[in-house]
Amino acid sequence: MQSAGFRQIFARLKRIPAAFAALIVISLICLVAVLAALQVPLSPYSYDQTSTDLMLGPCLQHLMGTDELGRDLFSRVVFGSKLSISIGFTTAFMALVIGTTYGSISGFAGGKLDNLMMRGVDVAYALPDLLVMILIGVLVGRGTWGILIALGLVSWMGTARLVRAQFLQLQHEEFVEAARASGQTGLKIILKHLLPNSLGPIIVAVTFTVPSAILSESTLSFIGLGLSPPACSWGTLASDGWRSLRGHPHLILFPSLFIFLTVLAFNFVGDGIRDALDPRTRLPLLKAKTKTDEKNEAGTVEGGEQDEEAVAV
Amino acid sequence: MFSYVLKRFLVALPVLWIIATFTFLLVRVVPGGPFDAEKNLPPQIIANIKAKYHLDKPVHEQYFLYMERLAHGDLGVSYKYVNRTVNDILLDAFPVSLQLGVCGLLLAVAIGVPLGTVAAVNRGRFPDSIAMFLTTVGVSLPGFVVGALLILVFGLYLKILPVALWESSRHMILPSLTLALGPAAYISRLTRASVLEVLEKDWVRTARSKGLSNSATIVKHVLRNALVPVATVLGPLTAILITGSFVVEYIYAVPGMGRFFITAVSNRDYDLIIGTTLIFAVLLIVANAVVDIVYHMLDPRMQTGG
């Protein structure tokens, strides 16, 4: 049943062109990241020390130019995708686990505990992410694990709120009451009935966590309080490039471009999944296109708007 | 009303105390101190320096010393900016950051509200798609990329604007613009949703049916109501602006609190870390309280509930 759900979301997502294009972009970048773990055209670390190709601009041999040690920037960006992308996904996974657990307990328990737990989320939500991450970084250190812990601790609140809201809504549905009446335990009700029916919003929240984690990591690394060399992420590359902005802007522009494209693609997919899950969204039909369908399609390209007719249904 | 404000103030004090304690412990629990970088100094001199700043005492004694001074409004001394107390530094840095934040906020409103309104009025049509595309781009661009691009274009190629420091109003343009972009995207999405909601209200139809022009309806009847929810996000906006200010002050070398915070963290400048964190906390508490108080005054239903 769940896989059918995913298939349905995917089928609907395919009909939102911007989101689908973004999904392809993400797949490509992830593919690059996976391949980077296996092989890179020119090694990002080792370099020909006799080479005089230092600080080259983009050329045929070095698509994105070289840095101050003569290292090929293209290789470094490809290699950096591994860390940036995996930080994004790992954070999303942590947000999923922490947020879902927290939200489930809060939403299922209700009453005073719910109130208390949500107050906690409100406070955590009101804090500036970067400030909290920097302070956590002081405590846990600035390696990859330190960054991941800091990211995980600031990213779960959105998911928790969503799961809790979804639970509160579902609690009074008949199938939940039936499960309760038939004597199922709380845990079983959560796992079998409440969570599977909350999957949609959870997927949306998690999709938006990936780009914000990538942004946070690169920003932290950029201001020098995140990862530092020899770790190689898009953020550390941009940070390196910043120092030679005046003479060699390509060193910051190429890593930045990849951060931007990836984050943009994830945001589009997030918007797309949200629209695909919203039954009020009128999607363009795949087959038998008529004039009016094409017009509708134009309207749904970016926003996937709900419209009056559909709302009325 | 006065009692409500007083109550908020009394609640804020223990919150600040908790934050001060938490940050105090945070910076001291971690191995490494402010004078670790000076490896060339003989141990006796290091010990003398530590004794001068009471860093040789047990942590709980340091804590009571710090809290006693804090109660008198003294945030301590900086270990790196010699001869300057944290109060001095923050007195200089706070107005700078405040200026930057206010400029950024005003710009964000000036960009976000019209963009969101245009999007909502043309919902589902081309301007809406463009506006929503722009907001997605706005939230997808890291501050340092915007900063780098603006510096390249306006500072290095066109050479029409200064790209660093904080001296004249011309110095404020690029930092404020960089800071404004993220919040502008946020505000325009909010404005759009809010305007869409108000557009469906009866009074809008009434205004139109009595012959008011479209633009007059939007300005007089729609925006006035739609901006109330937008005004209530000042709290989250302050958080976004603080986060943004770290990056903006770093890239434009603006001598504000964000930059001092970053350098304080890398230098382990204990008192400066706690001091800046406390000021940020005060800012957030004030912003959220102002929103609540304004909301309190705007909505009569809130007044009986307390």
Image: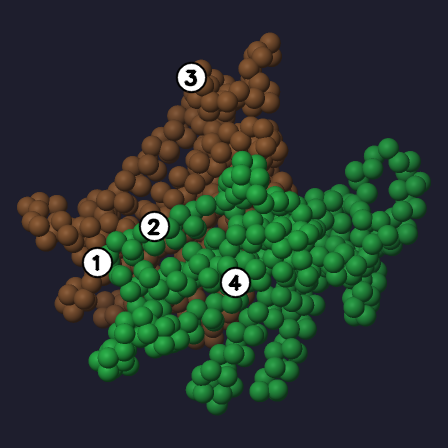
Chain colours: A brown, B green
Along the line of sight, the residue nearer the viewer: B150 or A259: B150
Question: Is B297 rendered above or below residue B65?
Answer: below
Q: On what subunit does the disc labeled 4 rest?
A: B
Relative image position of residue B163 (x, y in whole percent): 61, 43
Crowd class of label 1 (few under 14; some 14 to 19; many from 20; radius 10 Å)? some
Quadrant (top left, top right, bottom left, bottom right) of the C terminus of chain A: bottom left
Quadrant of res A230: top right
Q: Which residue is mark 3?
A: A60
Q: Is residue A20 left or right of residue B287?
A: left
Amino acid identity at mark 1: Thr
Q: CA distance from mark 2 to mark 4?
A: 22 Å
Along the line of sight, the residue nearer the viewer: A137 or B164: B164
Which numbered circle lies on residue A281? 1
Q: Which residue is mark 2?
A: B133
| Element assignment for label 4 | helix
Q: Earlier in the sequence, mark 3 or mark 1?
A: 3
**Can marks 4 and 3 be said to lie on one chain?**
no
Q: Which residue is mark 4?
A: B106
Q: Which label lies toward us, 1 or 2?
A: 2
